[in-house]
Image (cartoon, rainbow, N blue to C red):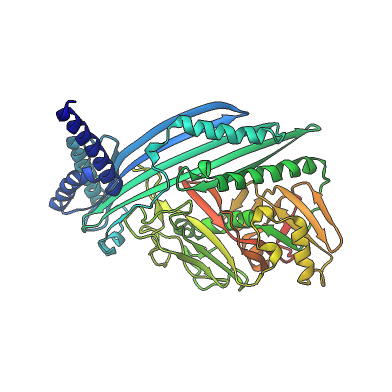
Amino acid sequence: MDFGKFFFDCFLIYDKIRQKRISMEQPLNQYSNLLNQLHQIARKSDCYLIARIQEKKIKSVDVLNNKLESAQKSNIKGIGMRIFTKTGHNAFGSTDDLQDEKQVIQLLEKIIFSAKKSQKLKFSANKEIFKLKPVKDIVIPKTEYIFDDIALKQIEKDLIDINKQAKKMNFTVAESFFNIEEECWKITRTDGTDIVFKIPRSILYCILIYKKQGQTIQRSVRASGKSYEILFSKRVKEKFIKQMRNLSKEMPEVIKAPVYKSGNYDLLLDAELAGVLIHEAFGHAAESDDIFAGSILSKNKKILKNKKVANSVVSIYDFANENERGFYPYDSQGKKREKITIVDKGVLKQAISDIYTAKKINAPLTGGAKAEFYSSIPVPRMSNTILEIQKVINDKLLSKSVIDISVKDIQNTLIKNGIFRNREKIVYLKGSRGGQVDTTKGTFMLGTDALYEITKNSIKLFKPASFSGTTLGALKAINFAMGKKSDLLTPGTCGKAGQWAPVSDIANKFIFISADKDVKIGGN
């Protein structure tokens, strides 16, 4: 046996493991010297630099009707640099060539020239960045699986298996997607700030189409996580497949169901629809750039702080922990992402703000700026939007997972708690299919998946109807909730300013809205 070769091979294996561990614990550390050079150049030019390096690894697989449509890997890496002069005039530039340090330095010099030129031309300036305190931090969430350890072939196999199970449920079309990302950021500032964080996220998404009698309906099931657990965990997969099975039973009945008469009714929204309402109709209106542009939460470009915007039982927050889609420990300027209390017991308190618009709207800075890529301009964005109702009916029938709660359970809970004493019927709206929102006018129109009329003695299914009205009217008409926080987050991807951001929303299992002239079902 050649012991020299044996020990050399062992050393190579050990060194490979060591390098892998270092890269996991200190991602993007190899660029520290380059960043130090860049900050030295900025200081010599009497300027302030925010530099952010991003590396994003992606694997995605698409399966349509049991057949693999696509399977691909991609890697994005680059640096974005924003220079501020002492007067707050600034300029931005980016490059994906991090290997050529000379080119990065030349780009920085051009950005410095542009920032000083904007000062001479007296363009708009912002000094808020200088008020931030320096921070040093590393945030690396633990995951059950390592991103690089799972091959695309294994993902394909498991996704095809899920898709086959969907096709057995007699859907006309079943398309399944799986996307996993590992996003690393290193953000440094001239004040000494040095932040490194990693965002692991995954999403499993199935589009289900059912056709019969010349009619077509489409639904979707989604699950999100940090890693491959949503594909490999037996518990998660069973929950996902059960959601599809529930839809396979409901969708043929929806096809046959009649149309409900439009009007104003006492409503019960499930957590998904309530979450979409809060995100789309209210959350965007609470982003500081929208407030500055003129949303329903502003007057003369200032936030209407302490204005009553909802019933006193309503509170709305924005915050994502590392297990939730939308997690972002620091914003793209290196400001810690705080839990934002947007509405406290019906009263408007805070905005999702960034350094460019927080002061302009007279609101505190809450670290709300997100940039999709190193080359993107950060804008205020939601993360995980939370609707929390203080007045809650808790019942044993509602303690189960949302996917196990039947409409009969809802009816029994309403009867047991005397909700039908002063009303003949309640319209239960289930699911969401997007819609249209105007944050300036404060109006919304959202699609639903199904409508049930519930009375003390009957449950009737109807075709989906639009849910529309004024945002503040709907929030003020929220009366109570049924059940604690839903066990199902609604994960998604939100588009704004040409950028896409992973987001989620969550609410109590069911939200009751009293009949109101400003909230309507059906019609145009």
Asked whether, in this view, residue 409 is left or right of residue 367, the answer is right
Q: Residue at x 48, y 65 (%)?
A: 300
Residue 128: give x, y in percent of width and height.
31, 62
Residue that extends furthest to the left in the rendered view of this protein: 44
Residue that extends furthest to the right in the rendered view of this protein: 457
Residue 229: give x, y in percent of width and height.
49, 45
Which residue occupies the foreground of this view, 145 or 268? Answer: 145
Residue 212: give x, y in percent of width and height.
78, 33
Q: Is residue 8 above or below residue 494?
A: above
- Tell me if residue 441 can be seen: no
Q: Residue at x 62, y 38 (%)?
A: 207
Asked whether, in this view, residue 337 is left or right of residue 471, the answer is left
Number of numbered markers = 0
Report the quarter where the N terminus lies: top left
Which residue occupies the foreground of this view, 414 or 355? Answer: 414
Residue 38: give x, y in percent of width and height.
18, 46
Q: Residue at x 17, y 26 (%)?
A: 2
- The picture quadrant where one finds residue 251 is top right
- Tell me if residue 166 can be seen: yes
Q: Residue at x 52, y 45 (%)?
A: 233
Which residue occupies the foreground of this view, 187 or 8? Answer: 8
Which residue occupies the foreground of this view, 147 or 432? Answer: 147
Asked whether, in this view, residue 445 is left or right of residue 425, the answer is left
Residue that extends furthest to the front in the rendered view of this protein: 1
